[in-house]
Image (spheres, grey):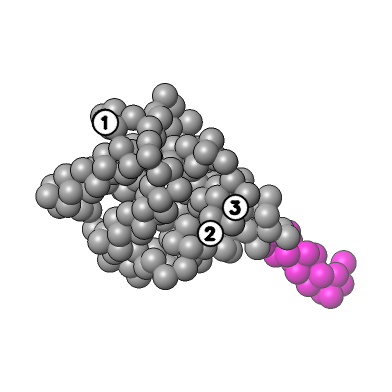
Amino acid sequence: MSAWVWVLIAIAVVAVLALVLWQAVARRRTGRLHERFGPEYERTVANAESKREAEAELQGREERRQQLEVRPLSQAACSRYIEAWQALQAQFVDDPSAAVASADSLIQSVMGERGYPVEDFEQRAADVSVDHPQVVENYREGHRLAQASADGSGSTEDLRQAMRHYRALFDDLVEPAADQPAAREHHADDAVRDRDPSEERMVR
């Protein structure tokens, strides 16, 4: 067999090995991102033109998050925010729309004090999704319902649901161990189950 044939065989073998290695790396990356982001991974993939594009976006979020100095709240700050949320629940009974608007502002305040940038809603959601992937969709849905109400197309029930969705993220942000992996494993349905914003006392 001539030398050039052996060269072609060697090139083919190297190409196959490179492809196998690339596929293994891609599978490992997919598994890691899926484990890290959970339902947020599925959402991002569904909304992207390709899985590669979605995974690049999620990796970008992780890299941006590493540049942020996110910190837990002090005990005094936790207590202050919990009291503020209780006041919002009481306000909801008389003025649901104002209570929801205040809930949105309160969450931004919590995020800001913890070190998340708060200028743009979509960026806020993307940043917080890295640490709180199980409840970030609640945040988006709460914001959507609140916007619908502000535009005059929402109902009192929509506002009630908005408060429930906001509450899911609020609890995660204020929880002392909110950024620990175990705290991120609970599902959004558990976070909002049996909670009514018209109740004046928090169920803790």
Is 2 drawn above or below residue 104 in the view shown? below
Outermost residue to the top: 194
SS type, badge 3: loop
As measured in the structure, the alpha-carbon distance from the residue carrying label 1 to the one carrying label 3 is 29 Å
SS type, badge 2: helix
Q: Is 145 positioned to the left or the right of 91 in the image?
A: right
Majority secondary structure in the magenta region = helix
Q: Is residue 20 magenta?
A: yes
User: What residue does disc 3 label?
Assistant: 152
Point out the tag, 3 or 2, that comes first from the N-terminus: 2
Q: Mark number for residue 58?
A: 2
Q: Is residue 49 visible?
A: yes
Quadrant in which the N terminus appears: bottom right
Outermost residue to the left: 76
Circle 3: residue type: Gly
Q: Tell me if label 1 and label 3 are in contact, CB under 8 Å.
A: no
Is 155 drawn above or below residue 51 in the view shown? above
As measured in the structure, the alpha-carbon distance from the residue carrying label 3 to the one carrying label 2 is 34 Å
Circle 1: residue type: Arg
Q: Is residue 177 visible?
A: no
Which residue does the image show at 26% across and 42% down from the upper left?
Answer: 87
User: What residue does disc 1 label?
Assistant: 201
Which residue does the image show at 39% across and 29% down from the upper left?
Answer: 195
